[in-house]
Image: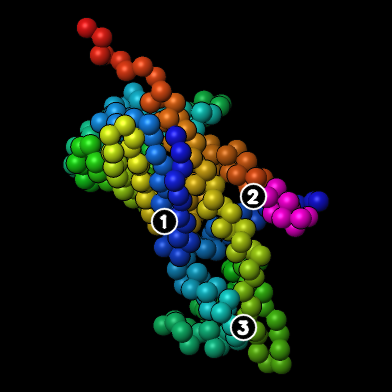
Amino acid sequence: MTVISTHKDTENLTLTFVAEFAADVERVWQVWEDPRQLERWWGPPTWPATFVRHDFVEGGESRYYMTGPEGEKARGWWKTTAVQAPNTLEFDDGFAGEDGEPSGFLGTTHCVVKLEGTGATTRMTTRSSFESLEQLEEMLKMGMEEGMREAMGQIDGLLALEANA
Amino acid sequence: MVVHELSELEIDRIFQALADATRRDIIKQAMRREQSVSELAKHYRMSFAAVQKHVAVLEKASLITKEKRGREQIVHGNPEMLHRAAQLLDAYEDIWRQRANRIGEILLEPRKGTES
């Protein structure tokens, strides 16, 4: 896996992430389509995801929960708004309540996924759009605090290096 | 070199302050040039008091600073704090990096279901 580029638009609250994989486009599509593969990478290792429903069709609904280190559950849902196998996928992602159903809490994140295959390699572009920074904060809080601290620590480390150079 | 870490409370304040479109716009205006609260208020279709409230939230999150000059309150942007807010957005990028890494690992596994 190679990260090609990332773009953060702080005003429109979008993150565009581009990575390349050494696999053909049909194979990469499977990691999104097959819930057993999807749940192996969607949640962080400390908060693994379980997809209890994954209707991977236009208008289809998915339901998942992530299990934290102390057994606590963070529930979420997807609504797939566009699917064109094996190249494009769009979905809304949001928080769900105790019953697993969409709670409306903090709105939705819209995600557009593009897979472009060139034989043996596939370029994957994901663009996530947030409604508010408050929403992004809650997402980061859901078991991702550790990752956040690490990322911040790395940046601080780099800044410190630059300052000392 | 000691690097100051943001506390949970500071992070909460930054994100809550930035969650509002008007407040994000106030920061942009204040970063462009320092100006008084009454000058700022002219940009928005809301009362002076409402703008002042937004300014207070931003000040509490240290995203802007306010200074009294004569009768006026002058508002400045605080680039250092904005830089820190950008760092929090970097954290989301890190999530995608980790996801892509895990996808990469799955793709390295031999394909299942192809054996006859």
Identify residue for label 1. Answer: A14
> Depth check: A10 or A60 in front?
A10
Name the residue beneath numbered marker 3. Answer: B34
Q: How far apart are the two marked residues, 1 and 2, measured between alpha carbons?
A: 20 Å
User: Which residue is at the front of the view, B55 or A115?
Assistant: A115
Residue B110 sits in which quadrant? top left
Looking at the image, the residue that sits furthest to the right is: B1
The type of residue carrying mark 3 is: Glu
Chain ID, mark 3: B
Above or below — where is A32 with respect to A126?
above
First in sequence: mark 1 or mark 2?
A: 1
Which colour scheme appears in the figure?
rainbow
Q: Secondary structure at mark 1?
A: strand
- Chain bearing tag 2 is A
**Quarter of the figure with the N terminus of chain A:** top left
Say yes or no: labels 2 and 3 on the same chain: no
The amino acid type of the residue labelled 1 equals: Thr
Residue on which the image places disc 2:
A155
Question: Horizontal and vertical percent for residue A93?
Answer: 35, 44
Boundaries of the magenta span: A156-165
Nearer the observer, A150 or A136: A150
